[in-house]
Image: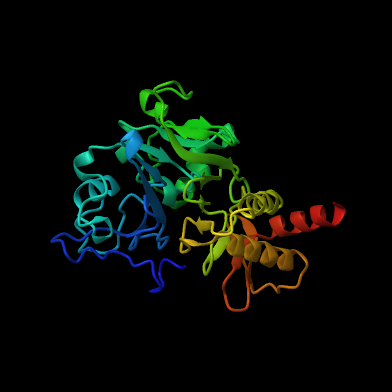
Amino acid sequence: MSIHEHDGLMLDVADHVKTKAAFKTCRLTPTAFVINEHSDVYDEKPLIYAKIVPSANTILILDTGCGGATKDTKIEIKSLREYIETVPLRANGDKPLNQGGTMRYIVVLSHCHYDHILGVEQFAKDSPILASGHSPSFLSEENLPFNSLCKSLGIDVPHYKPVLVQHLHTLQSSYLEGSQTADAKSTSLGIIVLHTPGHTPDELALWDETEEVLYVGDTLYEYAHIIFPTEGSITEWLRTVDDLIQLVTPFPNARISCGHVTAGRPALDVLTGARRFMADVLARREPVRNRFEKRGEMCVEYVQEGMRFSLVCPERLVEEARERTTSA
């Protein structure tokens, strides 16, 4: 379901506490919560995910949002970490998700775009920050200002040193002790890392094999533009989505949760729907709705009837994917 729809995923507006926060929360699964940064100055409204793993005394955070950069002057709590540790939530029995910071954190970044990393410094001082190992140069210190889009927005790049993880790696509590390998004392978090390039080279997804939830970052979502930056690739995106479809097909109850708008929706339906829409774009069954210049490139917009899926990207990426699809 859409996080902005009133059809079951109810956001905790925190109206039962005296403070007003830049975040709203609802329970996604028995162990996971979705946190919406609702009034950011960039109008991104990113979705942040928190999964509690009591056996490892750990709370796993996927993405950190816009760092509390809010346009709402009444907001009092702008720090994601402060919110998680201090604000009581109805979705969690009127308790903070990590009261007093008693659980340790492992933070995973779905990719390096600013609206997913601007809150990371709050955790980097004492917690491991994990990112995709698919394209290390994309995340290098010299390239991060450009690839995070911070440079183009004129904002500071947060300071953090990511631990790069490999495809199909199972997350372990050993990261908390500075180790990347499991040992006898290490506890599995039950989460598998998937490299999912397309939106960006460093895009990753998480597969919660116990609760059958696929977290896909900005690979796709519903009712908002699927956006590819200059560095994206529709050709790689198609391979990624095909792989994800293959992953979830044996799990009819699997759910998908995305970096924006879509959370807790049927995974196979969303993935196949987005795949069909992209096929229609490449086959010219979807008309171009708009053309405009951005970051020095001509970009195009496509909008499906009903607006469930839409696309904005450099026109070059569409033409490249058409050429490769035709030659394949």
x, y percent for residue 212:
51, 51
Residue 265 seen by the camera: yes
Residue at image coords 53%, 32%: 165
Pick out the residue farthest to the bottom: 306
Residue at image coords 49%, 56%: 258
Vertically, is 155 above or below 325?
above
x, y percent for residue 121:
33, 38
Residue at image coords 68%, 48%: 236
Residue at image coords 31%, 54%: 69
Quadrant assignment, res 316? bottom right
Vertically, is 84 above or below 187?
below
Quadrant assignment, res 71? bottom left
Lateral position of residue 294 relative to residue 43, left or right: right
Pick out the residue farthest to the left: 18
x, y percent for residue 204:
55, 44
Lateral position of residue 167 relative to residue 141, left or right: right
Please tell me which residue lies in front, 208 or 63: 208
Lateral position of residue 136 relative to residue 275, left or right: left
Please tell me which residue lies in front, 294 or 129: 129
Tally of numbered tags: 0
Lateral position of residue 310 relative to residue 180, left or right: right
Residue 142 seen by the camera: no
Colour mapping used in the image: rainbow
Vertically, is 286 above or below 251?
below
Vertically, is 176 above or below 24?
above
Quadrant assignment, res 178? top left
x, y percent for residue 34:
38, 56
